[in-house]
Image (cartoon, rainbow, N blue to C red):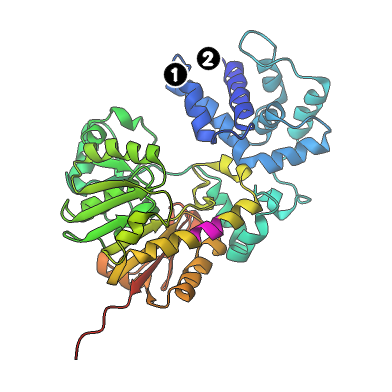
Amino acid sequence: MTPGAQIAAAIDILAEIDTGERPADEVAADYFRRRRYIGAKDRGQIAGHVYSVLRHRPALDWWSVKHAVDIGPRTRVLAALVLTQRWRPEAVAACCDGDRFRPAPLSEAEKRLVRDLARHTLRHPEMSRAVANDLPEWLAPYLERVFGKELEREMAALNTPASIDLRVNLLKADREAARCALAAEGIKAEPTPWSPVGLRLAERVPLGGLAAFKDGLVEVQDEGSQIAALLSDARPGMRVVDFCAGAGGKTLALAAQMANRGKLVACDVSVRRLADAARRLRRAGVGNVERRTLTGERDKWVKRHTGGFDRVLVDAPCLGTGTWRRNPGDKWCVTEGDLANLVVRQQDILGGAARLVRPGGRLVYATCSLLHEENEAQAEALLSAEPGFSFVPVAQVWRETIGGAAPGGERYLRLTPARHGTDGFFVAIFEREPCPTAS
């Protein structure tokens, strides 16, 4: 493809994303799936244009407003080419000549825009703190309360592409064996700094074609997510629930910790997500998992199994602020009303999950959120609502399960891209009081 055709494709993808009907990564994947003639190198260039806009949309729009041009996918791509990729105005104009598969020629207003932007950088002192940090205006105060003076550093880290982390499937290999299997296929991987079962790839590769992946030696899973599963302290022979299992990433990790022994129930309200998990479970050689579709946190199954499990993991639905390295388009799909609804839903889910924990058992609450409202506030609300539970310090559980000092807190675990190189992740652990012993 020519550079102009790549730009045209990026504009088309962004226009589809702007409809708000599907997530950005799903739109892009579908676009490329329907155009299999687009090679890997071209896909990389197109995705680069798309994600440059998604990461920096507020700043790009700020400049466009100053130049009185219509704001939309085309204008954002033009501005991103100049401000984030440092294209010269003549190079932009040459790619927009209206030829087949290339964008229409620049209007006079667009020509002035790219010429003027070539004299500037992306950031400007007059930008608000939200715009300068590529945030929705409504969300900036929530993150400022969490990070304070560190906001710029944390948001810069969230705007960089995420590493590709793999979790080694201990049912089939240890970390060194998996690393060697990848090396035999020409893939360089290094141990992750925090997770003892993680490998980090030096570069992006098509994993689906690798024998190590097809044979179930490794699964794609961010290091922060791996740690949340490890801190659940699921052991062989236990009865364990993954209450919001989704497509099964943490279910797989829990099954490996349990060495395929004991009972592990993967619950979710989505039949499709649990169906996707079945394929992954087969590839990993997992045999102790029951998949259970629930109607909600008050499902009759929850009532029938009250107090029946040693460990209950709740990876709760959240605003997903910790995953913006991978999903920058999500920033522009959420509202303050969404946050308010999620906070209520999280409380309901935690209440339902707590019923499943046996006396002496543990409830593990995790989110991929950076917000206090979805993290510490929810943990404290649970203790108020469930007096039979008490905190278990994460630092203590870290020493018992992973070893050494926990990197992200004493009472809770809070991981961030800037401080730890992971997605943003939060973990709180609770224990139900044991039954009193007879005197």
- Residue nearest the observer in this picture, 122 or 54: 54
Q: Is residue 388 part of the magenta span, yes or no? A: no
- Residue nearest the observer in this picture, 317 or 387: 387
Q: Magenta residues, as a range?
A: 342-346
Q: Earlier in the sequence, mark 2 or mark 1?
A: 2
Element at badge 2?
loop
- Residue receiving disc 1: 39
On screen, residue 301 versus residue 26, left or right, reads left
Q: Position of residue 345 (x, y in %)?
A: 52, 57
- Residue receiving disc 2: 1
> Do the residues bearing badges 2 and 1 touch, measured as CB atoms within 8 Å?
yes
- The amino acid type found where label 2 is placed reads Met
Instruction: Please say if 312 is above or below 33.
Output: below
Instruction: Please say if 50 is above or below 190.
Output: above
- Can residue 250 be spotted in the picture? no
- Residue nearest the observer in this picture, 142 or 269: 269
Q: Position of residue 113 (x, y in %)?
A: 78, 29
- Can residue 102 be spotted in the picture? yes
Mark 2: give few (<14), some (14-19) or many (20+) Cα within 10 Å: some
